[in-house]
Amino acid sequence: MRVLVTGAAGFIGFHITQALLARGIEVVGVDDLNPYYDVRLKHARLARLGKGFTFHQLDIADHEAVLKLGDGVEVIAHVAAQAGVRYSLEKPFAYASSNLTGHLSILELARHSKSVKHLIYASTSSVYGTGSTLPYAEAARADQPSSLYAATKRADELMSASYTHLFGLKQTGLRFFTVYGPWGRPDMAYFGFAEAISAGQPITLYENGRLQRDFTYIDDIISGVLGVFDHTPTEAEPHRVFNIGNNRSEYVTDLVRLLEEGLGRQAVTVNKPKPASDPEKTWANVDALHALCGYVPSTSLAEGIPRFIEWYKDWQKLRDAA
């Protein structure tokens, strides 16, 4: 079997690729290696992907280049995107290019391919915006996005729904909830906090850290992705969307405490009001994904953060020695 993974040098894409290679599946990886965060981390991830992996550096918004990648591909795991809620206020056109045009490129590839049987694509918990009640269930409102990032990902879901309606594409969208863990993204709060605490620099806490997030460890995320991979959509439900989270909500202050304990340093904190783009709380209802494939997240924040810190300390040494 051959699988195309977009964003293969990214956090989630790298882990998906590792899991598929461990199954003996051939993986074609795509990534543009853009400098949104330290490219050395992206190269280090790629260096760990060996036998059975082929890599193409390209921008998924280049639809002509993307259309050349479909030979023999049976499943697409499309997790490439311009990520980050606040960065969308600074570089909005990057989101239009990667998240909208890029997603359309992948849809066109799947549409014209003679071999693709299933397109799995990344969405986000941010689509729930300000209009949904907790815990978020897939049927909740997703029509009041509070950021451009969220709006582009909701648009991706709608584009996918239209392509299923028009062309019969079998697709699964996954709404990821605050993914963290080893080989993670430096722009995420847990990683940025670790960097600042290690350097003795202040960290910003909104509303004194009383915001709550459904922090989901990367291994649990991958178990859910593989569960979807093993359950191709049926003719009765060719396009489906699932939450993929930890099914609990925890305070950002608890995250900071665990980082302090693991790094052996106390954080210097600065309090600010919550940005308009940030929800007070996120919390995933994962009943639908459990019903599909038995998905049960098992890693608490108290277990996952020490594993991240263990990796982070090794990464610091490797990065600083380069």
Image (spheres, rainbow, N blue to C red):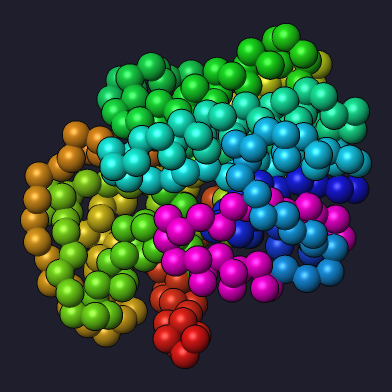
Q: Position of residue 298 (x, y in %)?
A: 54, 56
Q: Which residues are magenta?
A: 24-48
The residue at 25%/55% (across/down) is 252
Q: Any magenta on residue 171?
A: no
The front one of 303 and 21 is 21
Q: Any magenta on residue 42?
A: yes
The front one of 280 and 58 is 58
Q: Position of residue 309 (x, y in %)?
A: 41, 76
Q: Is residue 287 left or right of residue 64?
A: left
The residue at 34%/25% (across/down) is 145
Q: Is residue 210 left or right of residue 298?
A: left
Q: Is residue 258 left or right of residue 274?
A: right
Q: As displayed, is residue 306 above or below residue 277?
A: below
The residue at 34%/62% (across/down) is 190
Q: Position of residue 275 (x, y in %)?
A: 18, 40
The residue at 43%/39% (across/down) is 94
Q: How many marks?
A: 0
Q: As displayed, is residue 66 above or below residue 58?
A: above
Q: As displayed, is residue 79 above or below residue 133?
A: below
Q: Position of residue 239 (x, y in %)?
A: 68, 21
The front one of 291 and 322 is 322
Where on the picture, by quarter, is residue 238? top right
Whether residue 222 is visible, yes or no, is no
Whether residue 35 is visible, yes or no, is yes
Furthest-top residue in this view: 166
